[in-house]
Amino acid sequence: MSQADALFIRTCREILDTGVWDTDQNVRPHWDDGTPAHTIKKFGIVNRYNLQEEFPILTLRRTYWKTAVDELLWIWQKKSNNVHDLNAHIWDQWADETGSIGKAYGYQLGIKHVYPEGEMDQVDRVLYDLKHNPASRRIMTNLYNFQDLHEMHLYPCAYSMTFNVSGNTLNAILNQRSQDMLAANNWNVVQYAVLVHMFAQVSGLQAGELVHVIADAHIYDRHVPIIEKMLTQTPTPAPRFHIDPSVTDFYAFTRDSFSLEGYTPAPFEDQIPIAI
């Protein structure tokens, strides 16, 4: 069993067995038919993934990791907030008639800030510090800009990264305010594991540990039977992750810079409804 499968099973089991339902509250999310989308949740989940041991992708069901990488590059490379720049339709329901999702995600990473070393956006600041100030304890990004929240079509869920260099190893913490365990948990884990590998390689470092901190880890009411079915699946060993070693420029990575060897997820055909 892969590390990702074991952590997913443990977290979902903890939520289902000891979580708290919000059925007594008015909730914002709803299903396509207008029914409120209630959840059972746990507060303050922390999962640790050792990227030197394996790549943290689920085998209990397929994670469409290439599409996840596309979204990652859309946010962190293109720094875009327009779905026309994205090779998928996962953001369409939050986009306006121009394709914009407002001042969210990539827009925030692309805002320039003035530093003693010059003008840089958040991504370029991380790249600069990893090369020039690896001992810094201030290598961070933050998408939760309060002054722009009213112009975001969706508040950031995975909103902050903290990077830390220990010796020759790059570790990172992903902070997430809210997590749909079925639809998005492994999607985000895969994305930010790839991001750590990307930053590490172009900075002459080794990818180390990804720590995923989730404030509100929840399972939607209509997802419970799907999760219960998933937890009965037979997992397989983690695949081997490959990153093109010739890429030394963060902005030169493409979705084809990455591959997985031996990814054989369990068959799983259930449709997953998405609360909006």
Image (cartoon, rainbow, N blue to C red):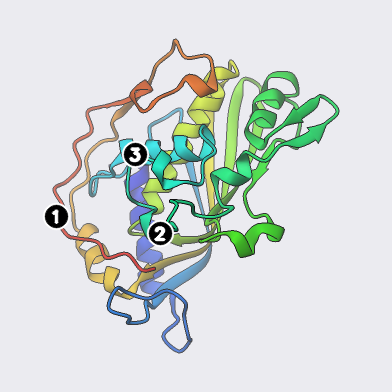
At a point 40% along the width and 25% down the height, the residue shown is: 254
Task: Give the x, y percent position of residue 6.
Answer: 34, 49
In the picture as drawn, the residue positioned furthest to the right comes out as 116
Callouts 1 and 2 close, C-beta under 8 Å: no
Tag 2 secondary structure: helix
Task: Give the x, y percent position of residue 251.
Answer: 52, 23
Neighbour class for label 1 at 10 Å: few (<14), some, many (≥20)?
few
Instruction: Give left or right: position of 33 versus 81.
Output: left
Callouts 1 and 3 close, C-beta under 8 Å: no
Instruction: Kindly report which numbered mark, 2 or 3, lies closer to the viewer in this rendering.
Output: 3
Q: Name the residue under label 2.
A: 11
| Amino acid type at image mark 3 | Asn
At a point 35% along the width and 64% down the height, the residue shown is: 13
Camera sees residue 273 = yes
In the picture as drawn, the residue positioned furthest to the top comes out as 246
| Amino acid type at image mark 2 | Thr
Tag 3 secondary structure: loop
Q: Quadrant of the N terminus?
A: top left
Neighbour class for label 2 at 10 Å: few (<14), some, many (≥20)?
some
At a point 62% along the width and 65% down the height, the residue shown is: 150
At a point 66% along the width and 27% down the height, the residue shown is: 166
Q: Name the residue under label 1.
A: 269
Q: Distance between the residues labelled 1 and 3?
A: 23 Å
Q: In which quarter of the image is residue 145?
A: bottom right
Q: Name the residue under label 3.
A: 87
Q: In this view, does 44 lie above or below 6?
A: below
Instruction: Give left or right: position of 247 versus 104.
Output: left
Q: In which quarter of the image is the C terminus?
A: bottom left
Q: Earlier in the sequence, mark 2 or mark 3?
A: 2
